[in-house]
Amino acid sequence: MDAAALQRAAASVGAAPQPAPSPRAPHAAGEGAPPIQRDRDGRAETVAVPRGTPVRDAATLLATLRALGLAHITTLTLTRNRTVLVSWRGARLRVHQGFAAAPDHVLRAIVRFVTARRRSERAAAVAELRTFPLPEAPARAPRRLRTLPEDQPLAERLTQLHRTLNADRFGGTLSDVEVVVSRRMKTRLGHYALRRGDAPGQIALSRRHLKRHGWAQAAETMLHEMVHQWQDETGQPVDHGRAFRRKARELGITPAARRAV
Ligand SMILES: [Zn+2]
């Protein structure tokens, strides 16, 4: 899809007025569900839309979802939100535009996410949506972050943690990287910046994440970013694809772990 098409698709589309939802509609107007968010560090899998896949505009996507059983949604907006993939409130649904090219089984999961009556049902729909590869979130934060002087002791502790995890979990195969503590990262827990030329990669951890969730969670985020470092240093694409998930499982971390800070 070219930029102009993306712009057009990003417009909000209102459908024709619909009959009032039946009394058995799963959610009253105004009610919503926690939005589906991107992974721990804002990366999504690399987009891999097969050739010839129809890319729907908002109106077509809404019509398709309604045909699949989305009864009480009357407005659909395609978004390019960095973190929220799907959210809805009342009769308004917001869907990341990457889903415009999704096959029916993924669209059915969007329908189930909205119409689910039980938490488990919704969780299953979310899990299914997460398997669909979306374009990488555009980088908004500067690639190279800096540690403030007052956070330097924390950064040193994290550098030591990186060394320990490298030795224990990666057989010492990873390079030393710069580890920084960032006060600017508000929604992401961690970030790995790719190597550039001779410059090593950089791992940034959110200070807010460290303070709120503690050392064990921070270590899990560190391992997540170290999997990206391993991808980078072994010439693989840096994403959350199959290789990432396999390595994450090997290390005992949740492949899709995420948490709003
Ligand atoms: Zn990641």
Image: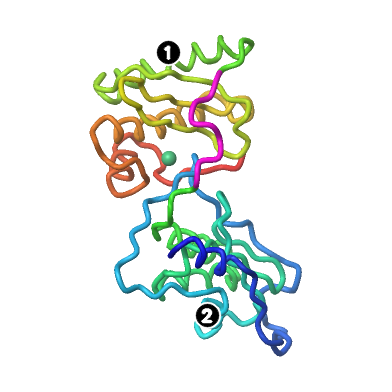
- Residue flagged by tag 2: what amino acid is it? Thr
How many other residues sit within 10 Å of disc 1, few (<14), some (14-19) or many (≥20)? few
Residues 150 and 164: in front is: 150
Write the residue at 49% across / 31% down. 143
Which quarter is ligand 1 in?
top left
Spot occupied by residue 218 in the image (x, y as percentages of width and height)? 51, 27
The magenta stretch is 138-146
Amino acid bearing label 1: Gln
Give the Cα distance between marks 1 and 2.
52 Å
Query: Is the C terminus in the top left, top right, bottom left or bottom right quadrant?
Result: top right
Task: Residue at 31% x, 24% y: name it.
Answer: 197
Say left or right for 164 vs 70.
left
Tag 1 near tag 2, CB within 8 Å: no
SS at badge 2:
helix
Say whether disc 1 or disc 2 marks the residue closer to the N-terminus. 2
Pick the quarter of the image with the N terminus: bottom left
Instruction: State the residue position of label 2.
Output: 60
Judged by depth in the image, the label closer to the viewer, 1 or 2, is 2
Q: Residue at x 58, y 61 (%)?
A: 79
Q: Secondary structure at mark 1?
A: helix
Query: Which color scheme did the rendering employ for the protein?
Result: rainbow
- In this rendering, position of residue 210 left or right of residue 176: right
Picture coordinates of residue 58 (x, y %)?
56, 74
Q: Is residue 229 magenta-colored?
A: no
Q: Main secondary structure of the magenta part?
A: loop
**Residue that label 1 marks:** 160
